[in-house]
Image (spheres, rainbow, N blue to C red):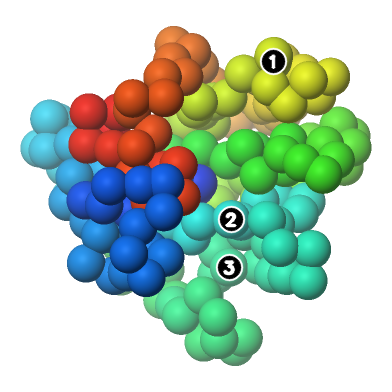
Amino acid sequence: AEAVAAGLETHGFGVDGVGPSCPGGAPSYTHNAHRSMPQLLADAVNADLSLLGYSGKGITKNASAQDNQTFDLLFPRALPETIGNLWDFNRVTPDAVLSVLGGEDYSPPAPANFNTFKTKYDTLVGQIRTQYPNAKIFLLVGPQIRDVYPAGYASRTNIKNAIEGIQQARAANGDNNIYTYLFTENFDDNKISGCYYHPNAAYH
């Protein structure tokens, strides 16, 4: 089996570090995709994994206000920071694509506009479907996403409603290979002890 996973905090950023402030920020030796949730999941089901991960990236906005290269723009690229350097989608034909996005969109200083978020997320799903017409696509809400923080953002509910709306609309148009899943909410300070409050190995 082949799987592609995309999204925020799924890629082992800082997992081998002791945060929140690791020496030198978040040096490369603290990153370890082999200990990430997607790799652990792929190992459990005997799948090969292609992992697309970039901290601080969202669908409508990024962690840095000066950064306008959102995840949908990175998806087609082989090198994420090089415009025009395109990935050859024929190299991998996944059975499943997992997307864990939205956390950055519903983070300070302001939450995403719901309709804009849903529309842009649906556009990304369309990109995925165009490249992988037969794959099962799973739209996930990460365990660290909560309604209580940031206060007033209703992050978990908004992301849930957006992905469920996308799934339902596409199913109504004949695409029955899109699924949604909410990880059990699990925000534990002891499990975000990687660099810059990223998940440690236990959380993955």
Give the label, 1 or 3, closer to the camera: 1
Q: Residues within 10 Å of mark 3 (few under 14, many from 20)?
A: many
Position of 49 relative to 189 (above/below): below
Q: Which residue is mark 2?
A: 56
Q: Amino acid at mark 3?
A: Leu
Question: Marks 1 and 3, how far apart in space?
Answer: 28 Å
Can you say which quadrant of the picture contains the N terminus? top left
Q: Which mark is residue 74?
A: 3
- Depth check: 25 or 155 in front? 25
Residue 73 visible in the snapshot: yes
Dots 1 and 3: beta carbons under 8 Å?
no
Q: Which circle's residue, 1 or 2, is located before the other in the chain?
A: 2
Q: Residues within 10 Å of mark 1 (few under 14, many from 20)?
A: some
**Residue 164, image x, y percentages:** 67, 19
Instruction: Indicate the quadrant where residue 199 lies.
Output: top left
- Indicate the secondary structure of the residue bearing disc 2: loop
Q: Which residue is mark 1?
A: 147
Q: Amino acid at mark 1?
A: Asp
Position of 124 relative to 47 (above/below): below
Dots 3 and 2: beta carbons under 8 Å?
no
- Indicate the secondary structure of the residue bearing disc 3: helix
**Residue 162, image x, y percentages:** 74, 26
